[in-house]
Every structure is written in structure tokens, then in C-alpha cells.
Image (spheres, rainbow, N blue to C red):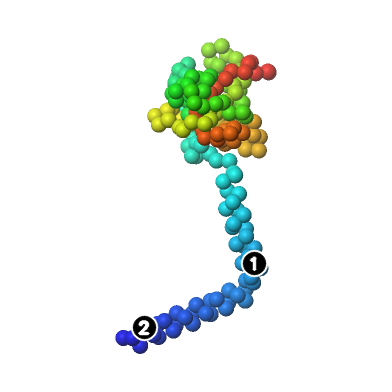
Amino acid sequence: MFDFIDRALASLDKRMEKTARRTARVNGRRSFLARTGGMLVGGMVMPLLPFDRGAGLAHAAGAKKNVNDPLSCDYWRYCSLDGNLCNTSGGTMTSCPPGSEASKVAWVGTCHNPNDGKDYLVSYNDCCGKAQVSGSTSCLRSEGERPGYRMGLYNDINWCMANENKGYHCTVALLVGLADE
């Protein structure tokens, strides 16, 4: 019985040595160091990349039902909103809840008001510095969204990055004015 185990271990040892020698012939130390360095640098850069708060969820297609209800994601002013509604998270549609502050940077959307038939510029500011509230309404609307390299028109990143406290809480929707034709 021990003879069988000795032969199996010797066979495994020979295969491992053969594999190690073949790998050493094909890949040198420099390529190993280059790959290891690339993985280390990539791992350090990963936390700096923007992240998607929507977790890949898409806004449900179909008819808008509650275009005049500010507590609904279908409210006309939320056409480019991505995040939690502040009016369901302790604040209002236009002001951050106590204990949080408006982000120093924001994204802008152009939303159509079905009540008067006009288009409005809406500034979306994240409220930062307070933990998210469970039970708040989370919306993901991306009408007219631009790719990530157009940062002022892109809603899928953490806009609290410019604030001292980078924790995301909710998003307010401020009317800037009428959109120019």
C-alpha cells in the first residue's frame, strides 16, 4: 500500500517539475514580474473608478403612470434621476435631509413637463454625508443620458466625490429654468 502512495507522489513530483520547467522556458522572470505588477497596479486603481449605483437595473419601459406625483419615479422632473428620492429619505424634492449636504458637482437633464408642454433644465444634486435610509424610493431614469465621458450629463457615478464626506444619501431635483429651443 505504501509503495503505491510512493509511486503516486513520485509521479506527481515529476509532473510538477516538468510543468515548472516548461513554464520557466516559455515565461521568463520579467514577464512574471510585469504581470504581477500589472495586477497590483490594477487592484490599486479599481477603487478610484466610478461605480453604478443602479446596479445595472433599467427603468421599466411603458406608459408613465404618475407624472404629477413627486413621490413616484415617473414624476416628470425625475427624467434623468438615478438614486434615492430625498422626499422619501427625510428631505424634500429640492432640499437635502438634515445631517447631509448637497454635492458640489451635479448632472443636468432636460425634462418635458406634460402639464404645460415645455421642456425644463433640471439639476440633480446628490445629498452627501449621511447613510442611506432603508425604505426610501430608489429610481433609475436615464432619458437623454450621455456616455460616461460627458460627466455633466452622466448620472451613473457617485457625485459626492467632490465633497469631504463622500457617502451618498439621496438626490434632489432642482428646476434651473426653461430649456432653450
Can see residue 72?
A: no
Does 92 appear above or below 160? above
Q: Quadrant of the C terminus?
A: top right
Q: Position of residue 127 (x, y in %)?
A: 53, 28
Q: Nearer the viewer, residue 114 or 24?
A: 24
Residue 91 locus on image (x, y percent): 47, 21
Establish if 8 lies above or below 39. Answer: below
Q: Which residue is mark 1?
A: 31
Query: Within the image, what quadrant is residue 34 found in?
Result: bottom right
Which amino acid lies under the numbered mark 2 shown in the image of this protein?
Ile
Q: Are marks 2 and 1 in contact (CB under 8 Å)?
A: no
Q: Label 1 neighbourhood size at 10 Å, few (<14), some (14-19), many (20+)? A: few
Where residue 145 sits in the image (x, y, percent)? 60, 31
Q: Furthest-left residue in view?
A: 1
Query: What kind of element bears circle 1?
Result: helix
Residue 117 appearing in the image:
yes
Residue on which disc 2 sits: 5
Residue at (50% x, 39% y) in the render: 56
